Amino acid sequence: MSITVHGKVIELDEEGFLANLDDWDEDVAVELAADEGLEISTERSVLIHKARDFYLEKQNTPSTREIIRMVAEGMGMDPIEERRSIDRHLYQLFPHGPDKQLAKIAGLPKPLPSDTEA
C-alpha cells in the first residue's frame, strides 16, 4: 500500500500505518486522515501533536488510557472521574478506535494490543 503526497510516494503497511515514520508531515497527516474518512480539525490536530510529542518523549505509542489523560490534563479535568465522557468524545473524533486511528494519522507505530486497553 502507498499514498502519494505532493508527488512523493509514501509507503504504508497492510493496515495503512506508515512504513517509515520519518515520512510524516502535516500533509501526510491530512492524506492519512482522508483515507480514514476524517478531516484534520483543530481538536484532532492538537491530539495528533500531543501523541507525537508523547512518542518522541517515551518512544511508545500512547494507549487509550494515556490519550484520556492527555485530554483530561488539557481540559483541567480528572482523568479517572471523567474517563467515560472523554472516551465517548474520543470515539466521536476517531470512530474506528482513538488509539489506532490517532496513531495512524499521527504517523506513529501501530499500538500493541496491550496498549489499546483503556
Image (cartoon, rainbow, N blue to C red):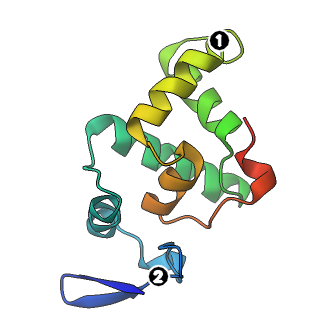
In this rendering, the answer to whether 68 lies above or below 30 is: above
Residue furthest to the left in view is 6
Horizontal relation, residue 118 to residue 54: left or right:
right
Q: Can you say which quadrant of the picture contains the C terminus?
A: top right
Q: Residues within 10 Å of mark 1 (few under 14, many from 20)?
A: few
Task: Name which residue lies at 59% across and 48% down.
Answer: 99
Q: Which residue is more in the foreground, 77 or 92?
A: 92
Q: Nearer the viewer, mark 1 or mark 2?
A: 2
Element at badge 1? loop
Measured along the vertical axis of the image, is residue 79 above or below residue 39?
above
In which quadrant of the rendered image does the N terminus lie? bottom left
Residue type pointed to by label 2: Leu
For disc 2, the neighbor class at 10 Å (few under 14, some 14 to 19, many from 20) is some
Amino acid of disc 1:
Asp
Lateral position of residue 49 relative to residue 69, left or right: left
Q: Position of residue 43 (x, y in %)?
A: 34, 34
Q: Is residue 83 above or below residue 17?
A: above
Residue 90 percent location from the top left of the image = 48, 33
Q: Which residue is mark 1?
A: 78
To which residue does mark 2 refer? Answer: 12
Q: Position of residue 59 (x, y in %)?
A: 71, 61
Q: Earlier in the sequence, mark 1 or mark 2?
A: 2
Find the distance from the CA under tag 1 to the CA under tag 2.
37 Å
